[in-house]
Image (cartoon, rainbow, N blue to C red):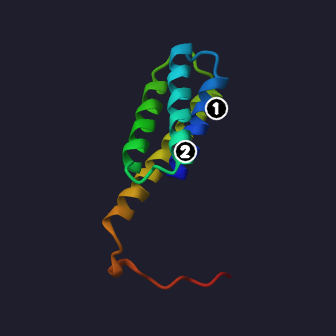
């Protein structure tokens, strides 16, 4: 859940810094980030599904991609966040499947 909170905070920061993003969308993203932060700080995260939170953040990212006149730097940050969210969702899905001992391999020593 900490990763979801971190990604939500980064999304909120990127959105807040971009003047082309409408104020209404900025308010929604900030509210999501604040609500998630409050839940994590309260400790009541056992009933929350991390995949659902990450998927919701991915939907926010998808909607941001459709906003016109966003600066190239912000679009690059949004693309990076999208990649991070996809990786986090994949890691969460893999973790939920449990340990597959057939995929274990020795760790290679450092050079």
User: Which residue in the structure is indicated by mark 1?
Assistant: 13
Q: Residue 5 shows which numbered tag?
A: 2
Q: Few, some or many C-alpha atoms within 10 Å of disc 1 (few <14, some 14-19, many ≥20)?
A: some
Name the element at disc 2: helix
User: In this image, 18 relative to 57: left or right?
Assistant: right
Give the x, y percent position of residue 62.
43, 30
Residue at x 54%, y 34% (from the top left corner): 33
Rendered position, 100 above or below 61: below
- Considering depth in this image, is 34 or 92 the residue closer to the camera? 34
Q: Residue 50 shows which numbered tag?
A: none
Q: Is residue 13 visible?
A: yes
User: In this image, 22 relative to 92: left or right?
Assistant: right
Name the element at disc 1: helix
Rendered position, 36 above or below 88: above
CA gap, disc 1 and disc 2 = 12 Å
Q: Few, some or many C-alpha atoms within 10 Å of disc 2 (few <14, some 14-19, many ≥20)?
A: many
Q: Is residue 22 visible?
A: no
Residue at x 49%, y 85% (from the top left corner): 106
Give the x, y percent position of residue 100.
33, 76
- Considering depth in this image, is 8 or 75 the residue closer to the camera? 8
Give the x, y percent position of residue 58.
43, 37
User: In this image, 7 relative to 52: left or right?
Assistant: right
Where residue 77 sits, quadrant-wise, is top right
Rendered position, 29 above or below 91: above
Residue at x 61%, y 84% (from the top left corner): 109
**Of labels 1 and 2, the one closer to you:** 2
Question: Would you say the residues marked 1 and 2 are in contact, meaning their CB atoms lie under 8 Å apart?
Answer: no
- Considering depth in this image, is 27 or 35 the residue closer to the camera? 35
Residue at x 51%, y 35% (from the top left corner): 35
The C terminus lies in which quarter of the figure?
bottom right
The answer to which of marks 1 and 2 sits earlier in the sequence is: 2
User: In this image, 20 relative to 28: left or right?
Assistant: right
């Amino acid at each position: 859940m900490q990763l979801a909170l971190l990604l939500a905070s980064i999304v909120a920061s990127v959105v807040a810094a971009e003047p082309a993003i409408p104020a209404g969308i900025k308010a929604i993203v900030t509210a999501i980030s604040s609500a998630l932060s409050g839940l994590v700080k309260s400790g009541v995260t056992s009933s929350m599904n991390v995949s659902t939170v990450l998927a919701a953040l991915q939907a926010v990212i998808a909607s941001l991609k459709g906003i016109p006149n966003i600066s190239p730097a912000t679009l690059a940050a949004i693309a990076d966040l999208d990649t991070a969210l996809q990786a986090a969702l994949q890691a969460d899905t893999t973790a939920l499947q449990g340990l597959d001992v057939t995929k274990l391999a020795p760790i290679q020593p450092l050079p």
